[in-house]
Amino acid sequence: MAETLAFYALAGLAVVASALVIGQRNPMYSVMMLIASFAGLAGLYILLDAPFVAMAQVIIYAGAIMVLFLFVVMLLNAPQEDAAEWDRTHPLRRPGIARVGAVLATLLVVQLGWALSAATGLTAPVGSRGGSATVSSVRELGRVLFTDHGFAFEATSILILVAMVGAVVLARREGDS
Amino acid sequence: MDLRLAIQLAIIGFTFFMLINASAILVLAERKIMGFLQQRYGPYLVGPHGLLQPLADILKLLMKEELRPKGADKWLFTLAPILAVTASFAAFATVPWGAETTFFGLLDEPIRLGAADVNVGVLVVFAVTSMGVYGIVLAGWSSNSKYSLFGGLRASAQMISYELSYATALAAVILLAGSMSLREVVDSQSGTWLGIIPRWYVFLQPVGFIIYVIAGVAETNRAPFDFPEAEQELVAGFNTEYSSVRFALFPQAEYINMVTMSAVATDLYLGGWHLPGIPIWLGWAVFLGKIGLILFTYIWARWTLPRYRYDQLMYFGWKWLLPASVVNLLVTAALVLYFNG
């Protein structure tokens, strides 16, 4: 009972905060809402008996990446955002890119609905322990990550490295030439 | 309510109470030690030898008018000090400060001294302290003042730069102990080598300890890394526009963060409550003594070392501290694998 209540509270926090991220005019508040959403997700991980993942979520996303976001928002001193010019025009007169976005958004909603309706058989109780998907100990997590998912792990590392090198190249170009 | 639960609640309350006291005591200690280092007396008028000075300070801060600049962001300006002080208290929750005890036979099963004990304790401390920086950054931004903004910007950049080295230094100890629970890390440091040298990780991890202490000073924004405040450049940095109780919460958060940092350093590197020759039931006193020693060094460093330049801070953090901590972690991992694997 308590676990179910905690699940709905945390899931509600995550969903509402995520919605508010895009609902804010002020980028500073968007960042704060994103942190709240991450906190909700971390709580859900704890409910799923994965405290290590929860703490990694808080340390890496809420603790490091969002601080970087705040840094950028403050550095650029981003003002309040107003709705785009075309947002006030008739839907059919909007530029093509907005129409593509609308189509993709509709597709996403349909896909989500389909996925949720197909997943009805998977209603496992919240916080259920056991099963191969539950990774509770760090040792187990490390073993799975470096053996079963070794390729994915290395591929992700290389992807991040490429992004890093790319960022450095882009940042360097103006100063040196 | 059964006795065990009552005692556990009492321990939590006691931990909280002592943290509040610690910030008051540290204010006095800082001013007294500063006076001593500058060849003067420090506060001397309130109470015997100025011992009641913190009470006077607190009363003064409570009586002041609360101001908020016109252009300030109402919500975040109020939220920022609350966030800072909440994170500093919460970070201490998983720090154990004494061995298991039955209170001289009062309980059947021994109880653990410390607010909570979780198996990822080290990570919890780290996660919650890293939340504390939002208090400073938001205070800097929401004040709508250029000095505050610069203080907040510096706080975020400094936090990102030094958190990495800090975490990497922690990871090396976790490798040695084979556990993320602070209590288990402490218990793996009991006993001695050759009968005289205590089995503390500071002897196995001298480089890691130095990195931890330097990064810890930077994380708590203390001199010589007190850039978010930097009163010679930024008036008072991120808390320029704050007054009264809202202002008081920032120094309080800073002092409690110092205590947490010292307590974690004691647990990870200095053997916690273990000291050869001292019985285990006096462990809390040993623990307190070790914390006091680190805190004294903290204050000593503040009034001895001049502040770095900002670019030196970045240069040092990224080009010296981070590579050193990564090499330290790799060497530790290799040695652990060689001797245990």
Image: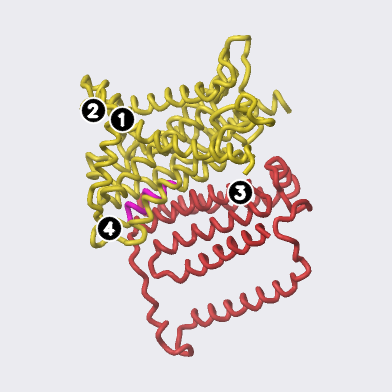
Chain colours: A red, B yellow
- Other residues around mark 3 within 10 Å, as few (<14) / some (14–19) / many (≥20): few
User: On the rendered structure, is B152 left or right of B283?
Assistant: left
Q: Nearer the viewer, mark 1 or mark 3?
A: 1
Describe the element under mark 3 as helix, strand or loop.
helix
Q: Nearer the viewer, mark 4 or mark 1?
A: 1
- Other residues around mark 2 within 10 Å, as few (<14) / some (14–19) / many (≥20): some
Three-letter residue code for mark 2: Pro
Describe the element under mark 4 as helix, strand or loop.
loop
Q: Are marks 4 and 2 on the same chain?
A: yes
Describe the element under mark 2 as helix, strand or loop.
loop
- Span shown in magenta: B132-141
User: Pointer 3: what residue?
Assistant: A157
- Predominant secondary structure in magenta? helix
- Other residues around mark 1 within 10 Å, as few (<14) / some (14–19) / many (≥20): many
Q: Please report the residue visible at 72 percent of the width from the left and 26 percent of the height from the top.
A: B340
Three-letter residue code for mark 3: Ser
> What's the distance in space between the residues labelled 1 and 3, CA to CA?
49 Å
Labels 1 & 2 near each other (Cβ < 8 A): yes
Quadrant location, the N terminus of chain A = bottom right
Q: Position of residue B79 (x, y in %)?
A: 38, 55
User: Pointer 2: what residue?
Assistant: B43
